[in-house]
Image (tube, rainbow, N blue to C red):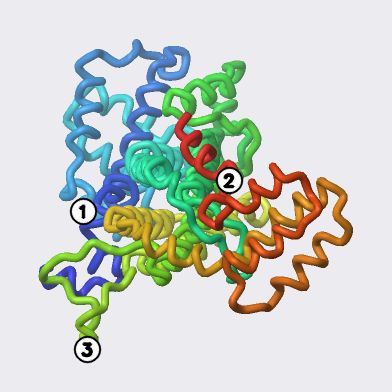
Amino acid sequence: MNIPTLLALSPLDGRYQQKVTALRPFFSEYALIRKRVYVEIEWFKAVTGIPDLTGKAVLSDEAIACLDALYKNFSVNDAAAVKAIEARTNHDVKAVEYWLKEQLAEHQEIAALSEFFHFACTSEDINNLSHGRMLKLSREQAMLPVLDDIIRKLALMAEELADIPMLARTHGQPATPTTMGKEIANFVYRLRQGRERLASTVVSGKINGAVGNYNAHMVALPGFDWEAFARSFVEKLGLTFNPYTIQIETHDGMAELFDAYARINTILLDLNRDIWGYVSLGYFRQKTKADEVGSSTMPHKVNPIDFENSEGNLGIANALLKHLSEKLPISRWQRDLTDSTVLRNMGVALGHTLLAYDSCLKGLGKLQIDAARLAEDLDHAWEVLAEPIQTVMRRYGVLNPYEQLKALTRGKTGIDHATLQQFIAQLAIPSAEKERLLQLSPSSYTGLAAYLAKNINN
């Protein structure tokens, strides 16, 4: 860790900077400026391809290659030059336009058309498309791959632990047994649904001028189908066209995207807390490293810190994601600036999300099942068989079966195999059913849990 890292205000740029590196190409200040350069260049190429607008032939292949190279080779120093212009103009998007004109002033063909940079655009035309691409590409290239790693790891665990019986706990008390694999499979199913929602959420864009009506466009070139042109342009950028906006893109799609992330985060929060609990019970042991320390004073400690770290970061992430989804769709009249500063925190929200994913995955990789510990708990919970016994009694018309088992087991200690066998022996039910109940144990009373766990990957 170097000195600038130690001086970072945000832990994402300090302590955890290496773990969120995958997001820097999408949400750093440099990344935003570079995306703006890309959108400005693509729009310039598009509008200069309308001969009726420019009065000239379309751009030459050499000119297009020059423009493309300007974006592809855009460096941190280039971004600093844009920021220097912004310091004079006090306008971030206009600074990009001026920088492009400066860079291309010596290119005769492009310079002659330089006023078609930012043609008929409001800043939000450039910003919303830049933000849209940042969100879409980061989802595909940074966020979903790590989420998929978690789901794959859990799916493997579900299958491996499908047959490991476990005492369930409802309200924290002993309850009908399950298997560890089935409990993991529950999260696999939920996360797959959440992933599908996240991956399919539409990211929208617009490029329709100052208040969304193509006013300047129509004055510049009346009769041209600007809406169809805008739709084609937005879709070419990989976004979904939004035809009805004010000055800003309405951000409804963004809100749905952030809600989708928050929903996944909530599921992972539930997973973290459950696994933490199983570690506490001794159902899972954690792999250790020779030089690691669990406590500064208690040498024996092996703490579930990865799940705790994940839980903490999920909380921060969801606080930000919920604010983003609640605030961004709201703008006074045709435009206010409250969304601008909020949008700069998209990377912070997703940074804490990615950090939480990483910690959860790391924690899952340390887990080792302790089947003997699970069996021990089951062997001390014979009272959970009160449910199947009273259910079979109901089937054969025995009076007050629930009440009989309640009197035998509720709040009682010392309920063991012998106690239940004695009770079963005197039941007026078919001998075959009586024998089946006598053979039942907490570890075998797991229903379809193993089947369901194994079937999660089919």
Q: Residue at x 23, y 49 (%)?
A: 79
Eyeballing the image, is 51 above or below 350?
above
Task: Give left or right: position of 83 versus 51.
Answer: left
- Which one is in front in this view, the residue at disc 2 or the one at disc 1? 2
Foreground residue, 185 or 325? 185
Mark 3 vs 1: CB contact within 8 A: no
Q: Secondary structure at mark 2?
A: helix
Q: Residue at x 61, y 42 (%)?
A: 211
Mark 2 / mark 3, whichever is N-terminal: 2
Residue placed under numbered mark 3 in the picture: 297
Q: Which quadrant holds the N terminus?
A: bottom left
Residues packed near mark 1 inside 10 Å, few (<14), some (14 to 19) or many (20 plus): some
Q: Which numbered dot is residue 256?
A: 2
Task: Give left or right: position of 56 versus 229.
Answer: left
Task: Give left or right: position of 126 versus 98.
Answer: right
- Which one is in front in this view, the residue at disc 2 or the one at disc 3? 3
> How many badges with numbers are in the image?
3
Q: Give the distance between the C-alpha atoms of the residues marked 2 and 3, in whole angstroms.
A: 46 Å
Q: Give the distance between the C-alpha atoms of the residues marked 3 and 1, in whole angstroms.
A: 48 Å
Q: Is residue 315 visible?
A: no
Residue placed under numbered mark 1 in the picture: 80
Q: Secondary structure at mark 3?
A: loop
Q: Is residue 200 visible?
A: yes
Q: Residue at x 34, y 57 (%)?
A: 369
